[in-house]
């Protein structure tokens, strides 16, 4: 995808393809009417239209990623958000403790 494509469009397509899901299947699973599911997701992925936060949240739930993943520009941060989002709360807290320690060491 070219650099002019909005980040939400790019991340949405990446996450959908990673699961091997069609645009139609994603749209229907996110609650879009069956008749318009594929065209709407296509328009979102091309950046022609931008989904609102509620729709992004529904896509994220279907795709198994936190909504913030779909908004994050940097690939490494997006990957970190995706991985953190899939951890149980106690493990996320452990990761946060490590990050806090690393951040304080770099000050």
Image (cartoon, rainbow, N blue to C red):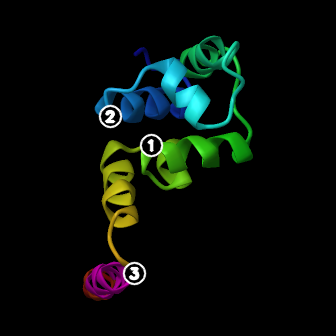
Viewer-closest of 49 and 74: 49
Q: Do the residues labelled 2 and 1 touch (CB within 8 Å)?
A: yes
The magenta region covers 89-99
**Residue at (59, 21) in percent of width and height:** 41
- Residue 48 pos. (x, y %): 67, 14
Q: Do the residues labelled 2 and 3 touch (CB within 8 Å)?
A: no
Q: Main secondary structure of the magenta part?
A: helix
Q: Mark 2 vs mark 1: which is more N-terminal?
A: 2
Q: Is residue 97 magenta?
A: yes
Q: Mark 3 points at which residue?
A: 89
Instruction: State the count of labels.
Output: 3
Which image quarter holds the C terminus? bottom left
Q: Badge 2 local density, few (<14 within 10 Å), some, or many (20+)?
A: few
Q: How far apart are marks 1 and 3 (CA)?
A: 19 Å
Quick one: SS at disc 2?
loop
- Residue 106 pos. (x, y %): 27, 80
Q: Mark 2 points at which residue?
A: 19
Q: Mark 1 points at which residue?
A: 63
Q: Does the magenta stretch include residue 47?
A: no
Viewer-closest of 60 and 103: 60
Is 4 placed above or below 57 here? above
- Residue 4 pos. (x, y %): 52, 18
Q: Mark 1 vs mark 3: which is more N-terminal?
A: 1
Which image quarter holds the N terminus? top left
Is 104 placed above or below 81 here? below
Q: How far apart are marks 2 and 3 (CA)?
A: 24 Å
């Amino acid at each position: 995808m070219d650099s002019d494509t909005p980040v939400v469009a790019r991340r949405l397509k990446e996450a959908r393809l990673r699961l091997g899901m069609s645009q139609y299947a994603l749209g229907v699973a996110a609650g879009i009417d069956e008749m318009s599911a594929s065209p709407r997701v296509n328009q979102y992925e091309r950046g022609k239209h931008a989904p609102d936060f509620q729709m992004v949240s529904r896509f994220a739930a279907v795709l198994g990623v936190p909504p913030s993943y779909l908004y994050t520009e940097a690939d490494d941060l997006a990957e970190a958000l995706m991985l953190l989002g899939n951890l149980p709360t106690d493990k996320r807290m452990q990761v946060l403790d490590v990050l806090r320690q690393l951040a304080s060491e770099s000050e």
